[in-house]
Amino acid sequence: PDIDIDFSYERRDEVIDYVSRKYGKDRVAQIITFGTMGARAAIRDVGRVLGLPVSVVDRIAKLIPQEPGVTLEKARKRNKRLDQVFDENPHLELLWKIAQSIEGMPRHTSIHAAGVVISRDSLTEYVPLQLGHEEHSLTQYTMEGLEQIGLLKMDFLALRNLTIIEQCVALIEENEGTPFQLDSIPLDDQSTYSMLSKADTVGVFQLESSGMRNVLRQVQPESFEEIIAVLALFRPGPMEFIPEYAKVKKNPGTVNYLHPDLEPILKDTYGFIIYQEQIMQVASKFAGFSLGEADLLRRAVSKKKKELLQEQREKFVLG
């Protein structure tokens, strides 16, 4: 399982300290990540070990393009100047050969930006640990490995926007001289929805990009639930349904459900599957999936893993 929760940017460390105290330091750990050996880094590291002149190694490294996904093999095919260098200096082929053998291997460890695992038992029963930041434990398995063994992964996300909100509340209380509760802000304030419909949202968290502002103009949200829908729609996949969603929203009577049992699941989103939870509900209702099985289907869809999708498709069709 994976649960995301946002905290003030300035107080995330307090949250980690809190869960460590509450559940036990032996049951809480941050998650390791491995930085891998890139093409240029492999050349530089091997060159240093072989004792080659820095100027020579640097010349070769700079002939490798700096772009995502580039490998030594791709670089050599694309940049014929590399072949020229090695033709003129055959002894440097050893540098290239060794660099290719270590390219992509782990080079260093780091800490996942948000991930924390919590276990009912001591984590050493399931995963090797090492000492991490400020004496917090650090798993020696990556996020993918932890998911496979079924540990609960929490993403404690640090948001500057929440810090800004905290500061705003403090300033209001300081200026007004009375306590202020965020819960007192009405969720049906029409002037706010008017502002959103006009896309007057520069500086509004998650709603200020030009693309999102175009969506707001199309959809013109009129409720808090529709703001949530807009945020969910504005991502690869659901994004292509935005024009149709906006059209149906203005004419709810045109909603067409492929099956009557879909209505209670998709009514709030005008007949569109927008949320991953809706995928799970559909799988449960139509194919008799347990929540655990439905979650596997949800993950297959979100990760776009073809083999897993095909496997889940067969289960879904057979019910």
Image (spheres, rainbow, N blue to C red):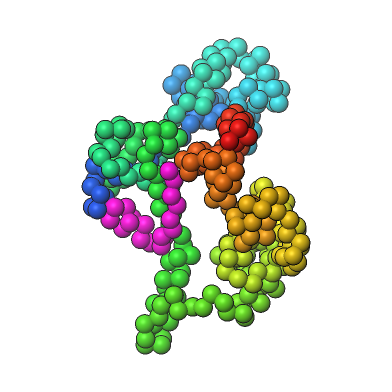
Looking at the rendering, the stretch of residues picked out in magenta corresponds to: 1-19
Q: Residue at 71% of width from left, 49% of height from top? A: 258
In this picture, residue 72 sits left or right of residue 22: right
Q: Is residue 16 visible?
A: yes
Q: Is residue 108 visible?
A: no
The C terminus is located in which quarter?
Answer: top right
Percent of width and height locating residue 301: 59, 40
Count of numbered badges drawn on the protein? 0
Q: Is residue 87 above or below residue 140?
A: above
What residue do we see at 42% from left, 37% from top?
Answer: 147
Q: Residue at x 38, y 33 (%)?
A: 149
Residue 6 picture quarter: bottom left
Q: Residue at x 68, y 56 (%)?
A: 271
**Residue most toward the front?**
260
Residue nearest the observer in this picture, 144 or 167: 144
Q: Position of residue 292 (x, y in %)?
A: 46, 40
Where residue 166 appears, as percent x and y from the top left, is 41, 71
Q: Is residue 5 magenta-colored?
A: yes
149 vs 281: above or below: above
- Could you say where residue 156 lies in the image, as x and y percent from the top left? 40, 53
Q: Is residue 128 left or right of residue 91?
A: left
Above or below residue 116? Residue 147 is above
Q: Is residue 137 magenta?
A: no
Residue 247 versus residue 263: which sits nearer the camera?
263
Task: Classify residue 252 as left or right of residue 169.
Answer: right
Residue 95 is left or right of residue 116, and the answer is right
| Viewport quadrant of the N terminus | top left
Of residue 164 and residue 1, the one placed in the foreground of this image is 1
